[in-house]
Amino acid sequence: MKINWGKIIIGSVSAIFLLYALLLISLYFFGVSTSAKITSYRQEYGERNETIRNQYTYLYGYEFEVNGKLCSGNGQRIGNSVYLKNNGTQTIPIKYLSCCPQLNQALDHSAVKSLLIFMGIGLLLLYFASKIK
């Protein structure tokens, strides 16, 4: 009996994408909303190579407290050339799972978009894995 390693690898990668999409769905529907304090904010590299000029990628870190325990996370956003320094008082809305606050995500317009992208990639890879003989 010959083991089809290609099918196993593609199926495993598909499962990882689908599990991450499931995590995003659970955060979106069952997550607890709170605000988190931005702890770091920096511009990544230079200008983005896109059609729209003057766009930059910004990375940020945040912290929030749940039941006396400090939890943290990070994210990114695309913005214009105005670089805002972190003054220590800025907050952003986030969602976290009450059973495991380490699983959290900043709430922005890209959350639903990334959910659809990860779900689509996972389903597409699962389809390709099913077609391998």
Image (cartoon, rainbow, N blue to C red):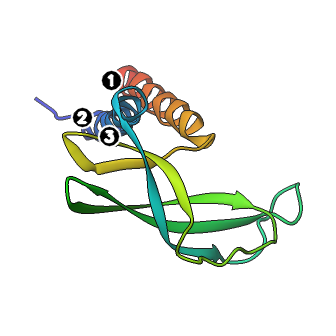
Label 2 is placed on what type of residue? Asn
Which residue type carries mark 3?
Answer: Ile
- Residue 67 pos. (x, y %): 20, 53
Q: Which residue is mark 1?
A: 133
Circle 2 residues within 10 Å: few <14, some 14–19, many ≥20: few
Badge nearest the viewer, 3 or 1: 3
**On the image, which quarter does residue 77 sit in?**
bottom right
Front residue of this view, candidates 30 and 17 = 30
Q: Nearer the viewer, mark 2 or mark 3?
A: 3
Quick one: SS at disc 3?
Answer: helix
Name the residue beneath numbered marker 3: 16
Q: Which residue is mark 2?
A: 4
Q: Position of residue 47 (x, y in %)?
A: 78, 72
For residue 17, which quarter of the picture?
A: top left
> Does 63 sit above or below residue 18?
below
Residue depicted at 57% across the width and 68% down the height = 59
Q: Nearer the viewer, residue 38 or 56?
A: 38
Inter-mark Cα distance, 2 to 1: 8 Å
Q: Residue furthest left?
A: 1
